[in-house]
Amino acid sequence: MTLTVHDIHTYYGRSHVLQGISLEVADGETVALLGRNGAGKTTTMRSVVGLTAPHRGTVELDDTDITGMPTHQIARRGMAFVPSGRRAYASLTVRQNLALSTRGKDSPNAWTLDRVLETFPKLQQLGNRRAGHLSGGEQQMLKLGRALLSAPRILLLDEPTEGLSPAIVADLGRWLAILKKERTTVLITEQNALFALKYADRGYIIEKGLVRHEASAESLRQSTEIQRYLGVAASA
Ligand SMILES: Nc1ncnc2c1ncn2[C@@H]1O[C@H](COP(=O)(O)OP(=O)(O)OP(=O)(O)O)[C@@H](O)[C@H]1O
Ligand SMILES: [Mg+2]
């Protein structure tokens, strides 16, 4: 599924946050959206999924204009958004959370419940625990598991490594590598730029609500200038 964002302008009140963002994620591509704190990464994702409608510009999924469409309709078209922070149904157990996200049997999905539990074995052990009692890393796995069960054709991941231990970040990396191999379409933001660029095909650097730079992940990984700008240690 191809995502095409053309010249979007998004405001919070009178604050003009996105000032004409354009980007594309081609079918099967993994694209990193990078930038310093407050650059507009989360706002770009929220604008794409209809949580904060852009005032101007267009968002297209394949050839359909989805600009300003309600979020649940965009989700039904195959887009899954995994926001940063804690956002699982806190009072439900892990198993109930996963069951809620599982599509009917007739919906073809490469990610069955068994496969999700195999990929994130921790979720199996935590089956009866209430989601509100999970650690940050466990919640993150639950959110990813739920997104996969919804049979996404495109996944938007907002800072998936935020607050995770190095061991869980490594798990996440293995999982991103699987998604890439299976050519799932992914847009990912990360503070940990080098982590995202390891799995991305291309990347965009945004600054103050505008795209400042676009290049292959490989060339962004090798640019000391970009790394200095993003504040990442070259050894990360
Ligand atoms: N709900 C809101 N109301 C008003 N301003 C907001 C709101 N959310 C974000 N902003 C502002 O919009 C700008 C872009 O924020 P955004 O969250 O998109 O940045 P980001 O690139 O995701 O940053 P971070 O790396 O810290 O997550 C910032 O200046 C922020 O202060
Ligand atoms: Mg953000």
Image: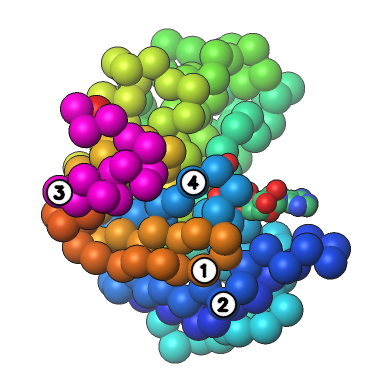
In the image, 52 versus 181, the foreground residue is 52
Amino acid on which the number 4 mark rests in the picture: Arg
Would you name the residue on which mark 1 appears?
210
In primary-sequence order, the first of circles 1 and 4 is: 4
Distance in Å between CA atoms under marks 4 and 3: 18 Å
Name the side, left or right, on which 47 lies relative to 27: right
Ligand 1 closer than 8 Å to the CB at disc 4?
Answer: yes
Secondary structure under tag 2 reads strand
Amino acid on which the number 2 mark rests in the picture: Gly
Would you name the residue on which mark 3 appears?
222
- Answer whether residue 161 is magenta in the image: no
Distance in Å between CA atoms under marks 1 and 2: 6 Å
* Residue drawn at 41 percent across, 52 percent down: 34
Name the side, left or right, on which 74 lies relative to 63: right
Would you name the residue on which mark 2 appears?
20
Q: Which residues are magenta?
A: 222-235
- What is the quadrant of residue 218 in the picture? bottom left
Residue 105 position within the rendered picture, expressed as x and y whole percent measured from the top left: 43, 52
Residue 27 position within the rendered picture, expressed as x and y whole percent measured from the top left: 29, 71
Q: Residues within 10 Å of mark 2 (few under 14, many from 20)?
A: some
Is residue 193 something that shows in the picture?
no
Q: Point out which mark residue 36 bears.
A: 4
In primary-sequence order, the first of circles 1 and 2 is: 2
Distance in Å between CA atoms under marks 1 and 3: 22 Å
Amino acid on which the number 1 mark rests in the picture: Leu
161 relative to 37, above or below: above
Asked whether the residues under the numbered discs 4 and 2 touch, taking CB atoms below 8 Å apart as contact, a structural biologist would say no
